[in-house]
Image (cartoon, rainbow, N blue to C red):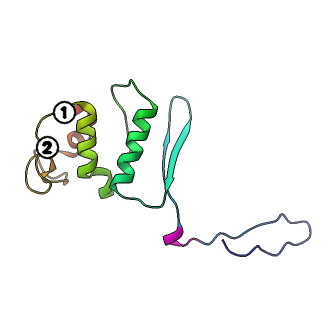
Amino acid sequence: MAADCVVLPRTPFSRTVTNVANLALKMRGSLSVATGKVQGICGDTRNEADFVNFVQFMIEGHPGHEVYHFVSDQLNTHNSETLVRFVAEHCGFDEDLGIKGKQGILKSRSSSNPQYPATKRTSVSDL
């Protein structure tokens, strides 16, 4: 936080916030379209484990559904090996997932891989 700004007559008190990347909190949030309820988690980091923890938090907070929809950007943390393994375990998918970068579903995160197109690769219901 920066120092308080000078308060002038007939103006509200204000404070300047300094955005320092190393000190910024990372937030993951969700919106229930049906209820309008917003939920989120804040943390110091933004890595694949954090995203998987968020997905797990959302699923555990809304048990009993057959399908969950998550919309995300193309950050590599959103299609990581950790997430694929979590989703496979959650869905009871017991087939071999392969080895990251070498074989199977985990061979490539590229949507250009014809064996695993992006729409199928990221769809929980396909597992």
Q: Is residue 21 magenta?
A: yes
Tell me residue 10's x, y (percent): 91, 66
Is there a contact, CB below 8 Å, between mark 2 and mark 1? yes
Q: Residues within 10 Å of mark 2 (few under 14, many from 20)?
A: some
Tell me residue 19's x, y (percent): 57, 71
Which residue does the numbered mark 1 point to in the structure image? 93
Q: Relative to 25, does residue 34 appear above or below in the rendering?
A: above
**Which quadrant of the figure has residue 110?**
bottom left
- Quick one: 88 or 6, which is closer to the camera? 88
Tell me residue 112's x, y (percent): 15, 53
Tell me residue 122's x, y (percent): 26, 42
Please state which amino acid type lies under the numbered disc 2.
Leu
Q: Is residue 103 left or right of residue 79?
A: left
Q: Is residue 32 magenta?
A: no
Q: Is residue 48 left or right of residue 63?
A: left
Distance in Å between CA atoms under marks 2 and 1: 9 Å
Please state which amino acid type lies under the numbered disc 1.
Phe
| Residue at x 22%, y 46% (from the top left corner) | 118
Q: Main secondary structure of the magenta part?
A: helix
- The magenta-colored residue range is 19-23
| Residue at x 84%, y 63% (from the top left corner) | 12
